[in-house]
Image (spheres, rainbow, N blue to C red):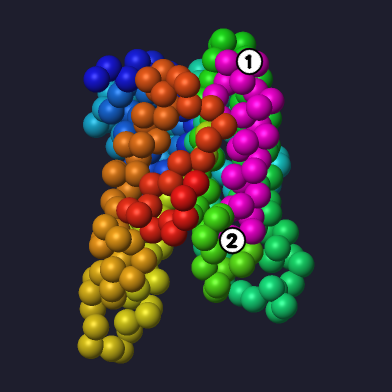
Amino acid sequence: MDLELKDKVAVITGGSAGIGLAVAEGLAREGVHVVLCARDEERVQSEAARIAREYGVTTRGLRCNVTLPADIDAIVDAVDQTFGGADILINNAGEGSNETIMTAPDDRWQYYWELHVMAAVRFSRGLAKSMRRRGSGVIINNASICARQPLGYEPIYNVTKAALVMLSKCLADELIVDNIRVNCINPGLIQTAAWEDWAKRETAGSSTGWQAHLAQVAKGYAPIGRFATPAELADFFVFLCSPRAGYCVGSTYYVDGGWLKAVI
């Protein structure tokens, strides 16, 4: 199937590893030029250069702390200067939390609000301008199954990801008149380095290997009985970016191996 994405320009936050990197590779495979944004400048530049070599597209790897408005403004300016704007924005940057509501200080709440919500607001606000000029665009926000089905140990993550889902719906209603489609994806268990590092910490000093521990987690949560690879999830992102998904507007899609215990 031709996804009709060749020579589009995509900006991916959290693009140097995990889901963001997999989405960048999936888009590049379709001929999309990609701008990767991440805090680790050396790594993001290295991955951007590798994608350019492997897929023959134009890439940029740019340092960006998405909690800082000035960094976001710099990315938007760089994309305008290099490509004349963007056609696709993937708001992917984020991380899990671990706290209780009663003990977490205000600055922790504020950090995650900036990371998961305001970064998406600011990037969308900045890049939608060029999407309007180009006649169309796609914005996909990467939230989490925890936005609807929370995990007890990370309430701030649950709350801010739920806000990102609502932001996606409101933004979709506002931008569709400009032919800019906004959607949200709520992944379940995706085997990223963050999950693997967590499993290694959990099994340190025990006889259970980290791989076996992740397998137990998967069997406990997902009926499919396993984690997804980032590449599996990325395939869905790529489809939603394409004109083949042209009637998909303002929706939240669960890619969770059956984990969600509700009918929606």
**Residue at the extreme right:** 106
- Residue 208 horizontal/vertical position (percent): 24, 83
Q: Determine the CA span between mark 2 and mark 1.
A: 31 Å
- Residue 116 horizontal/vertical position (percent): 61, 50
Q: Is residue 243 above or below residue 120?
A: above
- Residue 227 horizontal/vertical position (percent): 29, 58
Q: Which residues are magenta?
A: 158-182
Q: Amino acid at mark 1?
A: Asp
Q: Tell me if 76 is positioned left or right of 142 in this view.
A: right
| Secondary structure of residue under mark 1 | helix
Judge whether residue 119 can be spotted in this image: no
- What residue is rendered at 32% in x and 20% in y? 3
Q: Give the dominant element type of the magenta stretch: helix, strand or loop.
A: helix
Judge whether residue 109 can be spotted in this image: yes
Confirm whether the magenta stretch covers residue 186: no
Q: Disc 2 designates what residue?
A: 157
Q: Nearer the viewer, residue 120 or 259?
A: 259
Q: Amino acid at mark 2?
A: Tyr
Q: Nearer the viewer, residue 7 or 180?
A: 180
Q: Tell me if 82 is positioned left or right of 168 in this view.
A: left
Task: Specify the quadrant of the image occupied by residue 54.
Answer: top left
Confirm whether the magenta stretch covers residue 172: yes
Q: Nearer the viewer, residue 45 or 231?
A: 231
- What residue is rendered at 69% in x and 66% in y? 108
Task: Specify the quadrant of the image occupied by residue 91.
Answer: top right
Q: Is residue 161 above or below residue 13?
A: below
- Dot 2, crowdedness within 10 Å: few (<14), some or many (≥20)? many
Q: Disc 1 designates what residue?
A: 178
- Residue 49 horizontal/vertical position (percent): 34, 35
Count of numbered circles on the image: 2
Point out the tag, 2 or 1, that comes first from the N-terminus.
2
